[in-house]
Amino acid sequence: MRDCWHHIEKKLGDQYPPLHSACCNTIRDAKDIHCVCDRFTAHELTLLSLAKFAMATHVCGNGLHTDTHCAGYRVPEIKLPPPPASST
């Protein structure tokens, strides 16, 4: 998840990575996104926001399932905002 680090940091991250970013490619390529939750170290968990990570997984199209647990975080139902209206 190094490609996503700047999207999931507690204080600095932007939880909406661009769809064609390295972060989204990594998330989409994960065969079992829930397995990633078990790989975060204790130190990483002090620096990242699991809520931002959960949102990023949804934005990228490989979302964590509602009511599952990710490193102690219960994943809520996530509703993405609608895409911005195109200006013509």
Image (tube, grey):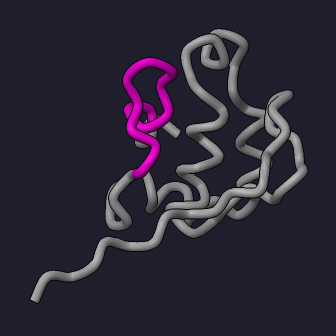
Q: Position of residue 38 (x, y in %)?
A: 80, 34
At x 69% / y 27%, what residue is drawn?
40
Left or right for 45, reference 25: right
Left or right for 35, reference 80: right
Left or right for 38, reference 10: right
Q: Foreground residue, 23 or 31?
A: 23
Q: Foreground residue, 39 or 85?
A: 85
Task: Specify the farthest residue to the left.
Answer: 88
Q: Position of residue 87 (x, y in %)?
A: 14, 82
Q: Quadrant of residue 51?
A: top right
Q: Magenta residues, as a range? A: 5-16
Answer whether residue 49 is magenta in the image. no
Q: Quadrant of residue 25?
A: bottom left
80 versus 75 height, above or below? below
Q: Foreground residue, 57 or 25?
A: 57
At x 45% / y 72%, what residue is drawn?
82
Answer whether residue 9 is magenta in the image. yes
Which secondary structure class fits the magenta region best? loop
At x 41% / y 42%, what residue is drawn?
3
Q: Foreground residue, 68 or 29?
A: 68
Q: Position of residue 15 (x, y in %)?
A: 46, 43
At x 59% / y 27%, what residue is drawn?
49
Q: How many marks?
A: 0
42 versus 36 height, above or below? above
Rendered-image quadrant of the C terminus: bottom left
